[in-house]
Amino acid sequence: MDMRKIIKQPLVIFGSTFLILTVVLIGVFIYQVKGVTGGLNDISQSGVQTVEDEKKEYQLPKQATAYQKEIFDDLIKAQEAYQTDQTEQTTKDYASLVVKNFIADFYTWTNKTNHSDVGGIQFINEEMQATFKKQAIDGYYETLDYYLEHDGAASLMSVEEVNLSDVNLNDTIEVEGEEGEMEQKACISVLANWSYAPTSLNEGANLQTQATFILTDVEGRLVINAILSE
């Protein structure tokens, strides 16, 4: 993967979402992104059930789908392996499962209660979570209440599978500092594709099914810093 980006101050940008039949997340930027150079292959929400890890906690939504439950268990095992021994394989497994769990939660509407019930927040860099949630409410989740009322949750989007096309453990990011100086920062980039369970409402809908996710390590926990969509 060979991307180009320059990161400035934290900013989240969503594509507009008006109708479920034209739901396309044009781009999510936890940072304002302009360009990444590919590197070498080295390297508390309400209504949730807490699953404890010896260093950090992840939370499984109380109304999690069967697919979410399946990949959540894998996430906990991958995190434990990564925090025990950060090898190329444990890093790849952990990054992959962070992305899979985010997609399965954020892009699924069948288990959401209202437009402020934004999924996947826990996988976002903590410093960006408040801004990310606000932009999600104003963007991707904007019309959720309407569809819950008129069509019911069962008719809405539910991610049924996530596949990863590429995982680059040693991408680099060009970061613009406070005084305008440029510096390189290591990152992990993950290109993902996903599919939704078929429903009558989703049939023929132009739903987002691909994005590139940029992750970094923050105190032994891999977090999403940017989501890039063509």
Image (tube, helix red, strand yellow):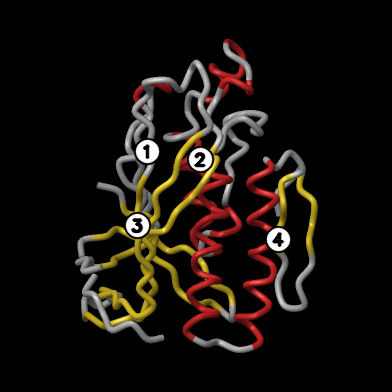
Q: CA distance from mark 3 to mark 2?
A: 14 Å
Q: Nearer the viewer, mark 4 or mark 1?
A: 4
Real-space Cα separation, disc 4 to disc 1, in angstroms: 25 Å
Mark-to-mark CA distance, 4 and 3: 23 Å
From the viewer's perspective, is 137 left or right of 77? left
The three-letter code of the residue at mark 4 reads Asp
The amino acid type of the residue labelled 2 equals Tyr
What's the distance in space between the residues labelled 2 and 1, CA to CA?
A: 9 Å
- Determine which of the numbered discs, if any, sits on residue 73 in the image: 4
Which one is in front, 21 or 67? Answer: 67
Q: Are marks 2 and 1 in contact (CB under 8 Å)?
A: yes
Q: Earlier in the sequence, mark 2 or mark 1?
A: 2
Indicate which label's residue lies in the foreground, 4 or 3. Answer: 4
Q: Are marks 4 and 1 in contact (CB under 8 Å)?
A: no
- Relative horizontal placement of residue 201, taking residue 8 as reference (left or right): right
Judge whether 10 appears above or below 222 on screen. Answer: above
Badge 1 is on which residue? 208
CB contact under 8 Å: marks 3 and 2: no
Label whose residue precedes the other's in the sequence (4 or 1): 4
Relative to 154, is 100 above or below? below
- Counting the numbered discs, the total is 4
Secondary structure beneath dot 1 equals loop
Would you call the spot at circle 1 few (<14 residues within 10 Å), some (14-19), or many (20 or more)?
A: some
Q: What is the secondary structure assignment of the residue under circle 2?
A: loop
Q: Secondary structure at mark 4?
A: helix
Q: Amino acid at mark 1?
A: Gln
Residue behind mark 2: 107
The quarter of the picture where residue 32 lies is bottom left
Front-lying residue, 98 or 57: 98
Residue at image location 56% in from the left, 46% down from the top: 104
Q: Position of residue 84 (x, y in %)?
A: 66, 87
Name the residue carrying label 3: 212
